[in-house]
Amino acid sequence: MSSLSAAHRAALTAVVQACPDKSLATLGAAVAALRGDKADELAIIVRDEARDRARRATAFGPLLPLFHPREDGAPALTFPRMILARVWRQAIQGEETFLPLLDGAVTVDGEWTLAADRLCAKAAAVLRDRPREVWPEFQRPAEGEPPSTPAELAGCFDLTPLARSALPRLPVWLERPDDNQLAGLRLLIQDCLEMSPEGGRRMIDILFAHVADAERMLRVVTRTSRLADREVTLSHSDMGVFVERLLTSVQARVQKIAAVRPSMGEAAMLGVVDDVTWCAGVLSEMDMSLQVRPDSSWGKTARMARVQVSGQLSGLMKSTSAAVHAALPMKRRVITGRMTRMSPWLEAPSDGEPIEAAAALLAAVAALRGAAVTFGCEADRSALKTELTDYLTTWANEALDSAADGEAENADHVLRLVGVTARFLTLIEALEAARAVRRRAASAEMARLG
């Protein structure tokens, strides 16, 4: 089989370079199974690209998360993914002799760091001197958005050597650092500020990209100086932008929470729970890490978010109670003469939309246990759990009594309804009550069959 032509090689190289990281390994395995000269050349192209990306990940490692949007959607400094490959290709031109030093780098210090820092410095120079070559479709961000610009990315590349040594210490700064560790953080920020007036904020942006839980970054921000835990100080510094970004995200999530409807499915309801939990995490961390004045802009925003979410949660709990009563209703039944009493409606559907809607709401209420404390709704949530536990247990026991007394026309249907009550009890974590209902239902089933 003949070898690839220059045109074919260029086309395949472009395709392989455009292949996502997650798919490159799969492509390599698929190509390895092929036979022939052309397949061998393609395998070399894939292998070279994988090696090139590994080297890029080593050299640009501290900045890599900046080229991916945050999973939690919080506003953060990010850059277009395509820029990463373009900057890398420009940075390695004429530096090929240093690239092998990046292979197999596993320690923080070593000769490879010299090569990595050299490439980062060259990347910064390219972004400053020839930005249009790597960022041709650049558009200036709107006011209030993180400054995703070539100059900003160049400034981040300037800080890469400092970030490389700072990242191993980040877990300590996120927890309970001692005085020496706090001094290390503050010295890092000072070093960054000496490089650029925006160096401190850029370093925090880089570190923030490596932290999955956005609210935990408040601990680092408020420790960057001795007075940074005070709003009056932090709000007048470059670091205040991180609090503003988190509060902006809180406001966006509060709007989503306000749009919740009891008829939403389980997946949508769990998404609402995630939003509530995220907001609770941010507001709780602000309470612990930052001294916020109630009458300030930050204080008013946080207070309004608490009030709005608390109101939504109260409404959600009322809807949950109503949904359970609608799914497993009580009907008035004649006992004798004019005497009546409320008893389970044994002809109620044992599946369908009312059952699933109630289940989704119950799962959401159970998942809100931690967040309800932050928003002052835990007492209501606990009361709802107690009320529903009593209602569902009573419903199941009376339904089983009716089936045992021969009052139910369809005993199998009654047992399915009792199974629904056990499912609901499990969802609200009333596990002992759910086990009791299931044991009695199993006994009733055995007695009926035996």
Image (tube, helix red, strand yellow):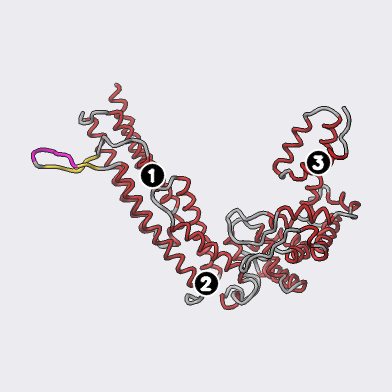
Q: Earlier in the sequence, mark 3 or mark 1?
A: 3
**Residue, disc 3:** 11
- Cα–Cα gap, marks 2 and 3: 53 Å
Q: Please report the bounds of the magenta region as a residue range.
A: 332-337
Screen quadrant of the C terminus: top left
**Residue, disc 1:** 357
What residue do we see at 27% from left, 41% from top?
395
**Is residue 223 placed above or below 15 in the rendered structure?**
below
Q: As rendered, which of 42 and 349 lies closer to the eye?
A: 42
Can you tell which quarter of the image residue 331 is in? top left
Secondary structure under the numbered disc 3 in the rendered image: helix
Q: Amino acid at mark 1?
A: Ala
Q: Amino acid at mark 2?
A: Trp
Callout 3 crowding tier (Cα within 10 Å): few <14, some 14–19, many ≥20: few
What residue do we see at 81% from left, 47% from top?
52
- Cα–Cα gap, marks 3 and 1: 53 Å
Callout 1 crowding tier (Cα within 10 Å): few <14, some 14–19, many ≥20: many
